[in-house]
Amino acid sequence: MTYCVGMVLNKGLVLMSDTRTNSGVDNISVFRKMFQWQVPGERMIAVMTAGNLATTQAVIGKLEERTKEPDERTNTLIKGRTMFTVVTEIGRLLRDTIQEAQTANGDRGKGRFTASMIVAGQIAGMEPRLFMVYPEGNFIEASLDTPFFQIGETKYGRPIIIRGYEPDMSFEDAIKLLMVSFDSTLKANLSVGLPLDLLVIGKDDFAPTHQHRVKHDDPYFQTISSNWGDALRSAFHSLPSYNFESE
């Protein structure tokens, strides 16, 4: 399982993903699920992946090969004129990769190679944009009504973000909010796990404003986890008690 979140703020974009993959409780591995490409001063693009590992690695591999070939005519990551063009190509690659795997495996491949992605970034002269790409290759874009996307194990961390999100919040507060969201997910689902990858893309920076890998011994994450648990217990006990005699 996976948990990835992409969030749009007035100041830019904040992304966080876990790194756990598993095929059972005794077969757990760590794989990066966040990838980034940049042209200094011109564009910054990041992708987070969830779903079948072979599928997502194949798509990322194809994107990586294109960035290594400067004369490649279809190198959309580097040469795409808009983020819409970039995400359209990524969606096509995802759809085609899934279809190829399913065709090669016949009936055994049905439903096994599905995957989804979050694509975020900015190209010079345009606003930062955030998209969620579905297995079919189609996608939706974040808006004022839907300012963040989640893929993977979404249900445990979503209520935290809904209650705490503000579009004008600082990057620091957004990171704190995501830390709480991920801590809640980690506590509820063992298939999501540390380390976590964090990426901040400031508006018009066209390079990582901040990036960090949150490991098991990360002091800030440990503090957030401990203090959030204490705060929840304190808030619970501060609520009025139920009265058996009340109507």
Image (cartoon, rainbow, N blue to C red):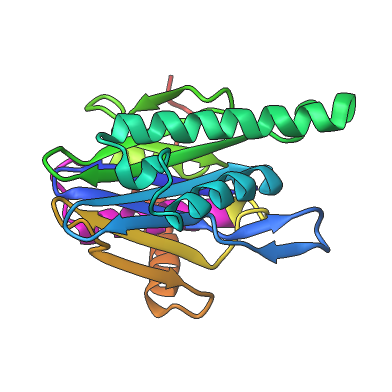
Q: Is residue 207 magenta?
A: no
Q: Nearer the viewer, residue 172 or 162?
A: 172
Which quarter of the image is occupied by the C terminus? top left
The residue furthest front is: 71
In the rendered image, residue 56, in percent from the top left (x then y), is placed at 61, 45
Residue 240 visible in image: no
Q: Residue at x 61, y 62 (%)?
A: 31
Residue lying at 26% horizontally and 48% vertically, measured from the top left: 13
Main SS, magenta residues: helix
- Residue 87 percent coordinates (x, y): 39, 33
Of residues 202 and 185, which is closer to you in this image?
A: 202
**Residue 107 or 180: which is nearer the viewer?**
107
What percent of the width, then of the height, locates residue 216?
A: 54, 75
Q: Residue furthest top?
A: 247
Report the magenta residues as a range: 164-186
Residue 26, x across and y down, in percent: 83, 63
Q: Is residue 159 placed above or below 57 in the rendered structure?
A: above
Determine the residue positioned at 25% across, 34% down: 82
